[in-house]
Amino acid sequence: MRTTGKRKYKTFQLFNKSREMPVKQTTALYHLQQLDDKLAATNKRLSEIADLLDQNTVVRAARSSLEQAEQDYHHWQTCQKALEKERTQLKEEAEQVEKRLYSGNIHNPRELTDLQDKLAELRRRHAEREEPLLEAMFALEESEQSVQTAQDRLEKVLAEQAETLGTLRDEQAKLTTQQNSLETDIKQARAAINAPHLSLYDDLHSRLRGKAVTQVNGDECGVCGVQLTSQLAQQVRRGEVLTCPTCQRILHIN
Ligand SMILES: [Zn+2]
């Protein structure tokens, strides 16, 4: 019984309060503006975070450096193998020619000269490949170092990013919660405003880059700085929904 009595009393109080002190439309509009500002800032940051999570340019750059280093390594590896193979073949060929040349079976002077020329040619070609082979071996060693450096760099970047990405995801989760609660608050704030004022607000909000309500400081419009007439300021103070004669925004005075 006592509980019911209390409840009745509470309801009466709320009703009474709302009848005695109705929320001024200008206050409600100003409150809505503040919530919309907060939501806009939240949405902006959420979209920045989405971009950051998406781009990941640092990781991409480190990965691409590693790929390049690996490509270089494979290039020099192939080069070295090809040169070594060629030199082995030339050496074997030269040995065979040499064997024939000194076998004692060649008597034709022409054939002897030909074989000597061939042997010299094979030896020359074999020697010619020594310098490029050394270069390839040196480059291979260097590129192996580069691969190692790039691998270390990528690992470091990935570890750093894991930390940054973790922080960003935490912030994203918090902001998403904030976004939801702001949307609820905005719904409630809009419910406290009558239809013509709400439609004025929405129109100004979309036309004036999200700023539909201006706070009056002293007797000056907080956005455009125009001095309001004392009559206009008085009307606004009484709670009338009026707009700034210069920037068109709904005027609000605390
Ligand atoms: Zn103004």
Image (spheres, grey):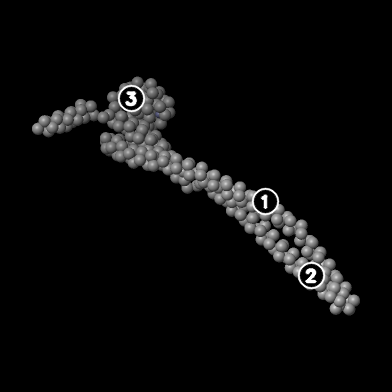
Amino acid type, label 2: Glu
Circle 2: is it few (<14), some (14-19), or many (20+) Cα within 10 Å? Answer: some
Q: Say whether residue 205 is left or right of residue 139.
A: left
- Spatial separation of the CA atoms under disc 1 and disc 2: 34 Å
Location of residue 74 (image quadrant): bottom right
- Is 105 displayed left or right of 189 in the figure? right
Residue in the foreground of this view, choosing between 57 and 201: 57
Disc 2 on helix, strand or loop?
helix
The residue labelled by disc 3 is: 254
Q: First in sequence: mark 1 or mark 2?
A: 2
To which residue does mark 2 refer?
95
Give yes or no for contact between labels 1 and 3 (Cβ–Cβ under 8 Å): no
In this rendered view, identify the residue nearer to me: 170 or 24: 170
**Disc 1 and disc 2 in contact, CB within 8 angstroms:** no
Measuring 76% from the left and 57% from the top, which residue is drawn there? 131
Is 137 situated left or right of 118 in this image?
A: left
Query: How far is mark 1 from mark 3, CA to CA?
Result: 72 Å
**Mark 3 surroundings within 10 Å by alpha-carbon count, few (fewer than 14), some (14 through 19), many (20 or more):** few
